[in-house]
Amino acid sequence: MTELLVQSLRGGVVESAHRVSAAVVDSSGRLKAKAGNPDLVTFARSAAKPFQALPLLEDGAAERFGVREDELALVCASHSSEPEQVELVRGLLTRLGLAESDLACGPHRPLSLDLALPDDHSDLGGRTSDNGQRTTRVGNRASRLSSNCSGKHTGMLALALHHGWPIAGYHQSAHPVQRRCKESMARWARLSADRIGEGVDGCGVVSFALPLTSLALAYAGLAASQEPAPRKVVQAMTHRPDLVAGRARPCTALMQAYPGRVLAKVGAAGVYGAALLDRGLGICLKVEDGDTWAAVLALWVILEQLGLDPPPSQTQPHFATLPVLNTRGETVGSLQATGKLTFV
């Protein structure tokens, strides 16, 4: 068992450590590098969104309803509910002839109002939101449109309308929309559907549990595929990374720093899925205790050890090491990754 850790240091002493498991896989399914347990089974959470979006394209719903590239990016997004993002989701929902009340995702206030940026990684911490960002909640009007998953839910509603499936219950496991999304996930992970576990995600839809190697393979396939649907998903996410997450968010910053070369999608509870598009490599990692910011640092060090040039610690250094602040705003420690991948 190789070890990759993200450590919290205070006064030069390791105060806590977050263990990371990771798999790096090429499009043929060969494991290229690993850390911890690459076969660890975990929930993909929002890292599954690109694969949940594919049926919208493959089944003709995107063409029928005129889904634009920016709207497709939001279907794949865990967005920050910035004004442009919310208005794009609202516009697509209206074009479908639907209303906010048709969304099954739970309401929350815009994350853009609450996001703790990396220089705010303090002892106060906040909570980890369902899109994998550390937030503090100070109370404000919540809405379903401001759910970070409202784009995904709108895409699922479009799929239901296209097939003539009921709108009611589209988020539930037995509904054809969720069966179709699971079929998509299974295909790209190269697993039979009955080998993928299910739970309920934070936004109410089905969440998929599968090995890290399988989710990494799915991302590698997305990177290498020449099929129209996956190419459109990749293009939407890499052309509009500002919509996939938002201002000062790691996914957005990473894809902006490496346009057309890196695709990244956060999942809640310490999960990341990513692809090196020009090398056909898929990456999946899980911080085993679910720490969100530890997952960001782990992804940065993994990309660096895979030889991404220039390294992310140079292009986006504020996500490579995070300060730990006390309530006076003083830097009293740091969060940093240590250890190495094992190449196989």
Image (cartoon, rainbow, N blue to C red):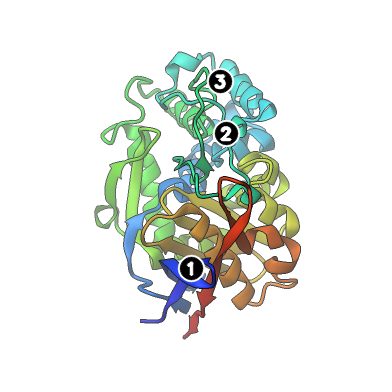
Q: Can residue 185 be spotted in the picture?
A: yes
What's the mark number on residue 93? 3
The N terminus, quarter of image? bottom left
Tell me how far mark 2 sits from mark 1, CA to CA: 25 Å
Q: Secondary structure at mark 2?
A: loop
Tell me how far mark 1 sits from mark 3, CA to CA: 43 Å
In the image, 297 versus 104, the foreground residue is 297
**Crowding near pointer 1: few (<14 within 10 Å), some, many (20+)?**
many
In the image, 208 versus 268, the foreground residue is 268
Residue 267, image x and y in percent?
A: 46, 50
Tag 1: amino acid: Gln
Identify the image quadrant of residue 274.
bottom right
Q: Secondary structure at mark 1?
A: strand
Tag 2: amino acid: Asp
**Crowding near pointer 3: few (<14 within 10 Å), some, many (20+)?**
many
Identify the residue under disc 1: 7
**Crowding near pointer 2: few (<14 within 10 Å), some, many (20+)?**
some
Tag 3: amino acid: Leu
Identify the residue under disc 2: 114
Q: Are marks 1 and 3 in contact (CB under 8 Å)?
A: no
